[in-house]
Amino acid sequence: MIREVVNRKWVDNKRDFTYLHSPIEDSLIVKKRKGGYEVKYLVQDTYADNSDLNTDEELFIVNYHRDFFIRRDEIIKEDDVRSWYQGERIEQEKAYHIFKLSCYIHSGVALSLGYNFAYDAQEWNTSHVGVILVSKKSWKTRKKALKVAESLIEHWNMHLRGDVYCLVREKYDDKKKRVSHDIVGGYYGYEEALKELAGDW
């Protein structure tokens, strides 16, 4: 069992290491190397932001709930979305496939395409004030656009529930004194992060 001690150090009595970060214990990889050890592990990426999820002009979401508000006014405005929901044609339909976005808000946020939400039985917690826009130029058919929209929603949900990780590598001498460390963040999904951790990064 790894425990935190003063000055935010994590002591691993079982392996006799003191880590710089709080490891997810199931992810620990310890290897003997020339002159010492290499330890790799995952930590939750608490600094992950959503800026890389919504910068693309070909694939993005907008949502107008006070607890989850994302806009792209240079491409589509809230009034456009409102008009589209009311059955009116909007200019953006020429360049984009547009899909309805459900936003379930209750002790957190979870997103879903359309009204296919398991949470929709609790209508009072689910808002329908957003859309996903997918470029027709890049994804010509609605079927392909739907697939990429689902992938974007999956990434957003991983971000929103904290399923984002950093890879940590610490090197120790033969007396188990740390000599170097590296950390790289922004890996979505625990299983995918584990695969990256096991590789040569």
Image: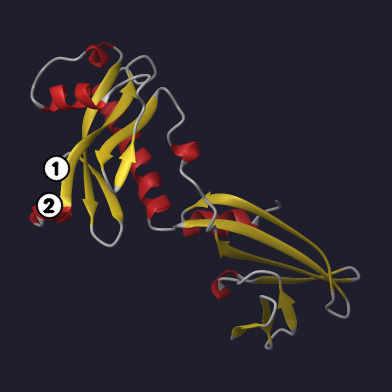
Q: Position of residue 132 (x, y in %)?
A: 28, 31
Q: Position of residue 122 (x, y in %)?
A: 10, 57
Relative placement, left or right, of 30 versus 128 is right
Q: Looking at this view, name the residue that lies furthest to the bottom.
A: 13
Q: Looking at this view, name the residue that lies furthest to the front.
A: 66
Q: Which of the colour schemes (rainbow, by chain, secondary structure, one colour) is used? A: secondary structure
Asked if the residue at tag 1 contacts the one at tag 2, i.e. Cβ–Cβ closer than 8 Å, the answer is: yes
Q: Which residue is mark 1?
A: 115
Q: Residue at x 22, y 52 (%)?
A: 104
Numbered marks: total: 2
Identify which amino acid the numbered label 1 is placed on: Tyr
| Disc sitting over residue 20 in the figure | none
Q: Quadrant of the N terminus?
A: bottom right
Which label's residue is closer to the chain start, 2 or 1?
A: 1
Q: Residue at x 42, y 51 (%)?
A: 159
In this picture, is 185 found above or below 79? below
Q: Residue at x 45, y 38 (%)?
A: 53
Q: Position of residue 81 (x, y in %)?
A: 20, 26
> Which structural element holds mark 2?
helix
Relative placement, left or right, of 128 versus 96 is left
Q: Please tell me which residue lies in front, 136 or 79.
A: 79
Asked if residue 117 can be seen in this view, the reply is no
| Disc sitting over residue 120 in the figure | 2
Identify which amino acid the numbered label 2 is placed on: Asp
Q: Residues within 10 Å of mark 2 (few under 14, many from 20)?
A: some
> Which structural element holds mark 1?
loop
Asked if residue 16 can be seen in this view, the reply is yes
Q: Residue at x 50, y 37 (%)?
A: 52
Inter-mark Cα distance, 2 to 1: 7 Å
Q: Quadrant of residue 108?
A: bottom left
